[in-house]
Amino acid sequence: MLRPAPAPGREAGGALDAGSSVEGASAVAVPLARDLALVALAKAAVSAIVLAFGFRAVSDDDFARVVLAQAWAHAPRLDPTGTSWLPVPFWLNGALFRVLGRAFAPTLEVARAIAFALGLASAALVHLSARWITGDRRAALAGALLAAAFPWSACLGVATVPELPTAALSLFAVASIVTPPAGPAPPAGRALLGASALVLATLSRYEPWSVAVAFAAMALLAAARLGQPRDAQAKLALAALGALAGPAAWIAWNRVAHGDALYFLARVASYRNAIGPGGDGTLLRLFAYPAAMVREEPELFLWPVALALIAWRARRGAAAGTTRPLPPLLHAVRPYLLPGAVATFQIAALSLALVRDGAPTHHPERATLLALLLLALAVGDLSARAFRGASTGARRALGGALLAVLALGVVFRPHLRREHFNPRADEVAIGRAAAELTPPSATLLLEVVDYGHLAALAALGRPEGVHPDRSIDPRDPPVRSSFEDPASLARRVAGLGAAYLVGRVRPSVIDFAGPPLATRGAWGIWAAPPAGGAPGALPEGGSRGPARPADMAP
């Protein structure tokens, strides 16, 4: 393919282009590999710190996704959930469970190890994206290190949810089609990589769908640019079509499987309506996502403001003809403008979806991760440039301002957060105990108090043998728990042939099954007495129940 020769990068490491010579490619590959290793090591350290401080899950969704992946590993099917949840995360985790199954059971610990590894891969993708966006090795490295460490990136790097990999794939796709300031335009073949990334992203979460639309438009505009060779035009047109393949496939599947191409939208809207109408008006909903970004990551917004004020004061105080105490920073923002426009378009689409009850039901900041990653790249880049080129006095002012911003974040961050994390420690502990105390073929009856029962299911590791006591889906009619009285519990156990019970320790269960075999916090596990047998009698085993993991997906 004919295209201009690549311009050298502004720093060592240069531009990453397919047209470079063998020697140039080798010169780029070594520092790139070194930087990738550094970013991965930093991400691993951040992830270890997050785990050491006790973080385990964002919400009950984390455990639900593990349970559904475990169920897929046991019995694979094209649509893992039959709900509005997209399939790729379950295919990936379920396939890894099956591959690792000979050495490791599909436990919650294995799922968390997979999440840890995906966090490292996401950090590497973010760094490569930064290299493509800026064409500057130092800028990319500084931004990628900050993008690996800000709190939501840190937490999602170990959580068993697909938000971070999805955002990293979306950023990679956008980066594959933008032209860095020093040029040249990226090779058309790179757009095919971006389109492939978007197929995975759009079949993992819904928020990249608007990114796919923007990518397709950018690819078609690039293909229409004068002077493009035919093979480049063909690749860019193919990339535009490929970017939309994920949404198109999911819409077609919903038409075939459910008789409604937009079934998933109706399901999400019905779930939001069932949990009750939101108290926020239309205007508040429109600005809910930007507000969530500022509320959850205030330092990423405060620090650029402080940096701009220091630069303005330094420029005003500098005598004419003297060296500037700070390097010019405005031109360094240019590489992020087009990717930032795509992220803004995504947030606008999410805001409109929220107004129409079609957006995520909790932790809205998760859906803005692409914008937060881009902001972190820009802030890290500008900060490194400012400190590197500042005079001694300006560097002291920058250091003081940075410490002040971090201190403000530490003080006010806990008061800004609306939703908190729930590790479900007792439910996880009883699930692990059940895995140790019950035979693999035994059928269990699990009490459903709230969605915390998903943590017990995930820790147990074999949802196909567990019957949740009832549905608490807000769209279903309310059902009374059979664990509330011995007679109801006896009928439920007999109907299922359950060999063991897992639930809260309370008199109604003890009257039916006797003392628990083990307790963890408020939860216990019992052997179900045989028909006509004494409470607490150990069963020989139990019939295997139908595979039905709990469904909490909208």
Image: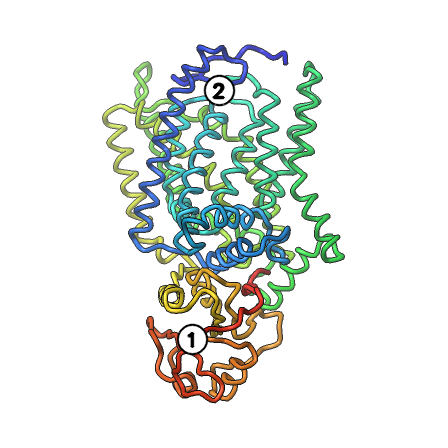
**Residue 249 sits in quarter:** top right
Residue under pointer 2: 16
Which tag is nearer the camera, tag 2 or tag 1? 1
Residue ID at (55%, 39%): 343
Neighbour tally class for label 1: few under 14, some 14-19, many 20 plus, Cα within 10 Å = many
Q: Nearer the viewer, residue 137 or 479?
A: 479
Q: Tell me: residue 247, above or below residue 520.
A: above
7 on left or right of 436: right
Residue ID at (51%, 81%): 482
Give the quadrant of the N terminus.
top right
Residue 243, numbered label: none
Q: Nearer the viewer, residue 9 or 29?
A: 29
Q: Tell me: residue 277, above or below residue 327.
A: below
SS assignment at label 1: strand
Q: Amino acid at mark 2?
A: Leu
Looking at marks 2 and 1 on the same chain, the residue that comes earlier in the sequence is marked by 2
**Residue 303 sits in quarter:** top left
Give the quadrant of the C terminus.
bottom right
Residue under pointer 1: 503
Q: How many marks?
A: 2
**Residue 278 sits in quarter:** bottom right
| Residue 121: percent from left, percent from top | 44, 37
Q: Amino acid at mark 1?
A: Gly
| Residue 508: percent from left, percent from top | 43, 86
Q: Is residue 536 visible?
A: yes
Q: Nearer the viewer, residue 1 or 14?
A: 1
SS assignment at label 2: loop
